[in-house]
Image (cartoon, rainbow, N blue to C red):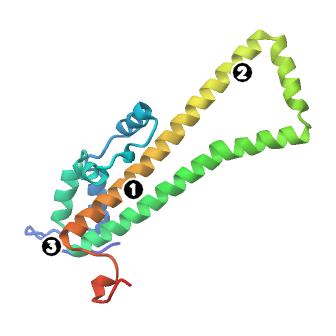
Amino acid sequence: MPVSDKAPSENGSPAPTTLEDWTALLALPCDGMWRRIRAWTYSASSPRMRTARVPDLMTGKGAVALDAFLAARSRARVKALRTYAIVNQEQAAAALRMTTIANVSVPAVFITAASQISSGSIWNDLWRFYTRDPDAAVALAILSGVSLLVLAWLLAYSATRMGQARDLRHRIDLHAAGRGIYFGLEDEGGTAW
């Protein structure tokens, strides 16, 4: 169990642990998933293409609440929460990679292998089957459309969660920089080079 870096509260109850602070931090308001997805769909490019990335990051929904939350924590606790944020971001990145592999790469490999094994005849057979039965062609079109929508939703959801994890880490880094909390050799009185 993580230990607290703060003295017990005035009423004698123990101070929150790093994990309890992390849980409270995650409960703070954050940039919504749909807002991120809308930003992509409006411009077909990342909203991070703007030049005011850092001010946007620090003025987004929840940034003020996060800053106030971190301001009430010790320097050591901010460093610990940054470590949690790094692990959180790496876990979100791994989840995005696995989602992409499972839903894009594996089906692509399966389709390529089926095509190679059958010397392309599988596609001719499928085409003949679907051109003979109009209902089968409609069913295939509906199934393909639904599959693509589900795939797009899964990838958008995973990418959004990855973006939220990255933003949280960057906001903690920016707060720490504002307080003069550094995470490198400077902390030990050494040089960073």
The disc, 2 or 3, on the residue closer to the chain's N-terminal end is: 3
Q: Residues within 10 Å of mark 1 (few under 14, many from 20)?
A: some
The disc, 3 or 1, on the residue closer to the chain's N-terminal end is: 3
Cα distance in 3D space between marks 2 and 1:
39 Å
Quarter of the picture holding the N terminus: bottom left
- Label 2 sits on a secondary structure element that is helix
Q: Which residue is mark 1?
A: 166
Q: Are marks 3 and 1 in contact (CB under 8 Å)?
A: no
Instruction: Kindly identify the residue that appears in the image at 28 percent across and 51 percent down.
Output: 57
Residue 16 in view of the camera: no
Residue type, mark 3 in image: Pro
Q: Which residue is mark 2?
A: 140
Left or right position of 21 against 102:
left
Left or right position of 130 against 193:
right
Q: Residues within 10 Å of mark 3 (few under 14, many from 20)?
A: few
Residue type, mark 1 in image: Arg
Instruction: Kindly identify the residue that appears in the image at 26 percent across and 63 percent down.
Output: 174
Residue type, mark 2 in image: Leu
Q: Give the percent coordinates (x, y) of residue 167.
A: 35, 54
Q: Which residue is mark 3?
A: 8
Relative to 58, does residue 16 appear above or below in the rendering? Answer: below
